[in-house]
Image (cartoon, coloured by chain):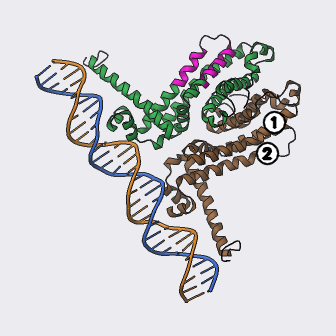
Chain colours: A green, B brown, C orange, D blue
Amino acid sequence: MSLGAASSTGRRTTTARMADRRQQVIEAAAALMARDGFHAVSMQAIAQRTQVSVGSLYQYFEDKDDLLLAVITSVLEVFGKDLPAAMDGIADPVRRLAAGFDAYCRALDRHRDAAVLAYRESRTLPRQGRRLVQQLEIDTTRPLVDAIADGQATGILDPEVPGSLIAFDMVVLAQAWALKHWHFAALVDLDGYVATQLAVVLRSMVVPRRRSAYPDLLRRAARVS
Amino acid sequence: MSLGAASSTGRRTTTARMADRRQQVIEAAAALMARDGFHAVSMQAIAQRTQVSVGSLYQYFEDKDDLLLAVITSVLEVFGKDLPAAMDGIADPVRRLAAGFDAYCRALDRHRDAAVLAYRESRTLPRQGRRLVQQLEIDTTRPLVDAIADGQATGILDPEVPGSLIAFDMVVLAQAWALKHWHFAALVDLDGYVATQLAVVLRSMVVPRRRSAYPDLLRRAARVS
DNA sequence: ATATCGAATGAATGTTCATTCTATCGCGCT
DNA sequence: AGCGCGATAGAATGAACATTCATTCGATAT
C-alpha cells in the first residue's frame, strides 16, 4: 500500500518537476538539432544549454537515440493535433479536407526547422523508433483519408480516385513546403502555396457536376513572382 | 615544355588510374552511406571496402564532406541525365511531360537508396555544397518547366497555372516514391504510382477542350490494394 | 642503371563524445 | 529535528574517428 495510485504528494511534485525539465530538455534539444543536425549536437551541449547536468539527461532518457525519438515524436504530435482540430465541425467533406490541408501547411510553416529535423533524422533512429514515427505520420493522414472517403460516398468526389494515395500526396506536398522551402518560397508565399496545391488536388477529384460549389478552391491559381 | 598538354604517357595512365579509383571510392561510399548513413560510415571503413588506403582517400578528396559532396552529385547527375533523354524528340508537350515524369520516377526507383541518401544528407553539407545540390535539383526541373510552358503556349495547358511550381510538385512527388516508399509501396506499384500522379497533375492543367486527346493519361486512376 | 617525383600506405595522433560512476544534495516523511 | 532515498551533478572513462605524416613504392626520363 505504500506504492500505488495514492503515492505521496511529495512524489508527485518531484515527478512533475522531472516531467517539466524533461520537456525543457526536449525543446532545447529540438532547437539545437534543428540548427546543427543530430550528430553535431553533443549531450554535453544539450546539458549546458538547458542548465541540466549530463548525468540528469541520462535520468530522463535512455540514451541519445531515445532523446531524439522524444524530440521527433514531440514535434509530430504538435502537427498531428492541429489538423483534426481545424477539420472538426465542418460538414462539407471538401471544405473539411481544405481546412485540414491548410492547417497542416501552417503548422509545418510555423515549425519549419523542427519539421526538417523530424523527417531528416528519423532515419538515424533504430528500427522500432522509425516504425513509430511512420505510424504517427499515417495517423496524421487519417482525417484526410476519411474526408476524401466521405466526399466519395456523398458523390462529390470521383469514386475512382485512390483516396488514401491522394491523401498522402497532400501530406507530402505540405511537408514539401518545409523541406523544399528554399525553392518554393521563391515562387509563392504560404497562402498562395496552400491555395495552389489545394486547387491541383481538388481539380483532379471533384466531379464536374459539383465544381460550381467550390469556385474559390478550384479556380485559385497563385500568382507566381 | 616538360609540362603542358603533351604530358608523358606515363602521367596520363597514372591519372586515369586515379580517376578510376576515385570513382570506385564514390560508388562504394555511396553504397555504405545509403545503408548506414553518412555519420555511421568511417573513412577507415570506406578504405577497407575499396581496398584503398586511408591516406589515398585524402589524395582523392579534401575531406569527408568533400567525399559526400562527390557522392551526392554523382547520384543526382544520373537522375538528371535520364530525364531529358526520355523527353527528347517528343513533340506533344503533354506527352513529353509525361515521359519525363515517368523516366524520373523510374530512375528514382532504380536508385532508391541513393536518392534517400542524397536528399537526407545534403543538409550535412557545408553551405556551398548545399547550394550546388539545390542548383542541380533546379536544373533537373528545367525540362519539365519548359514542357509545361510549351503546353501553355500551345493552348493545351491552362495558362493561369503556375508552371514552375507545378513542375517542382512533380519533382517532389517523384522523390516521394523513394522517400516515402514504405508507405506508397503498400498502396500501389511503380506503374500505378506514375499513372496516378500524372493523372492528378494533368487533370489540373489540361484545358477541357483538349482532354479528349489524352484519355490514357487523364483517366487512369490506379487500382489500390 | 639510377635519379626523381608523385602516388600510396597505414600507423600514430589528438580530439570529440556518449556513457558511467561516485559523491552530494535536498525533499518529504516520521 | 533528522533520516533515507531518489534526484542531480560533473569529473572520469574509454572507444571511435577524421586527419596527418614519415616512409615506401613504382613508373618515367636521362
Residue B5, position as x, y percentages in the image: 71, 71
Q: Which of the 4 image quadrants contains residue A145?
A: top right
Task: List x then y, in percent, for residue B135.
Answer: 67, 45
Q: What kind of secondary structure does the magenta stretch mostly adopt?
A: helix
Q: Is residue A145 above or below residue B16?
A: above
Q: Which mark is residue A179?
A: none
Q: Which residues are magenta?
A: A78-105
A111 vs A82: above or below: below
Q: Is residue A54 left or right of residue A184?
A: left
- Mark sitting earlier along the chain (1/2): 2
* Quadrant location, the N terminus of chain B: bottom right
The residue sitting at 74% across, 47% down in the picture is B82
Q: Is residue A114 left or right of residue B159?
A: left
**For the point 52% across and 32% down, which residue is it?**
A114
Q: Which SS class for mark 1?
A: helix
Q: Chain of mark 1?
A: B
**Residue that badge 1 annotates:** B149
Whether residue A55 is visible here, answered yes or no, is yes
Kindly report the distance in space between the C-alpha atoms of the residues bearing marks 1 and 2.
18 Å
Residue identifier under label 2:
B86
